[in-house]
Amino acid sequence: MQQRMVNLTLDSLEDVPRRCRACVFWELSPLRAEAAREIGEPALEKEAWLSHTLLEWGGCGRIAYEGDAVAGYVTYASPKFVPRSQEFPSGPVSPDAALLMTAYVNPAYAGSGLGRQLVQTVAADLARRGIYAIETFGDTRGEAGACLVPADFYRSVGFKTVRFDPRYPRLRLELRSAIDRSVEAEESMEIHDSVEWFKLDDIELEQFFGEATTGRNRVDRPGSQRGEPFDRAACVSGEGGGCGGERGTRPER
């Protein structure tokens, strides 16, 4: 069956799992998110956010498919476009970094390494655009149905804690400057609108992370003993409801 990864656009947004499709945890401030839910139009707010971010900043997400089925997706952007990033006690995000917002892996693909591939694809895109680092807020409690990914998953793929918080540490992944890479390497690693997600490997990952990943403990696989919370952490599959921080709650300080 064909496996591919495409850009998140207004068209492909329709394929995102329904509860994630209507979740604006990251896209709006807590007060605006609450207002959107009361009015009943969070999905329209998410469309508006995506349209604005694509026009002003560029690509901000990827969706992985197997055949016609969504296997997973990831979203990311400049923290200037992510109001929720200002609410975390371990913030703010560094001005030279993009924010990895959230990710989703369909439980059917747990253990396939797709979670790692999604991060890898974000790294490739941002490095090509001259961005020097990815930062994110991890969840240390593995909270079910939350819009954050467990911190252990991020650490397993190379992120380092830059500001400690007992619940929501801020983590950072340094990327090699695009200036330091040869034209040949950049062309060979260019990720087009549609790529086969399962063909990206550790050697390609090293080009962007700047350190060897071979031999690293493979707890990054969603569905493995420590990686399993990744599937629960972000917009878990299912019908109805919101994902994670619903009701516009702020991260605990």
Image (cartoon, helix red, strand yellow):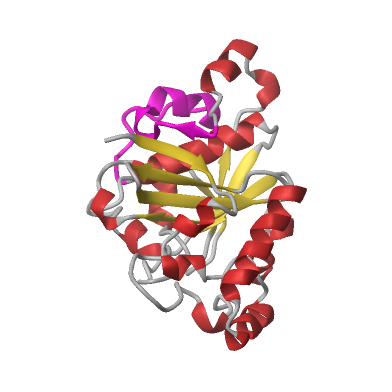
Q: Which percent across, then down, holds residue 168?
A: 51, 66
Relative placement, left or right, of 148 versus 31 is left
Q: Which percent across, then down, holds residue 182?
A: 63, 13
Q: Quadrant of residue 136?
A: bottom right
Image height check: is 204 above or below 96?
above
Q: Residue furthest bottom?
A: 38
> Magenta part of the protein: which range?
193-219
Residue at 55% x, 61% y is 164
Residue 112 located within the stretch drawn in magenta: no
Res. 97 visible in picture: yes
Res. 88 visible in picture: no
Residue at 38% x, 69% y is 141
Q: Residue furthest right?
A: 56
Residue at 64% x, 29% y is 128
Between 184 and 219, the one lying in front of the other is 184
Between 239 and 170, the one lying in front of the other is 239
Q: Which percent across, then down, holds residue 217?
A: 30, 39
Relative placement, left or right, of 136 versus 107 is right
Residue 206 located within the stretch drawn in magenta: yes
Q: Quadrant of the N terminus?
A: top left
Between 110 and 162, the one lying in front of the other is 110
Q: Quadrant of the C terminus?
A: bottom right
Q: How many marks?
A: 0
Relative placement, left or right, of 168 versus 219 is right
Image height check: is 37 above or below 148?
below
Q: Which percent across, then down, holds residue 98?
A: 65, 47
Image height check: is 2 above or below 212?
below
Image height check: is 236 above or below 124?
below
Residue at 50% x, 37% y is 121
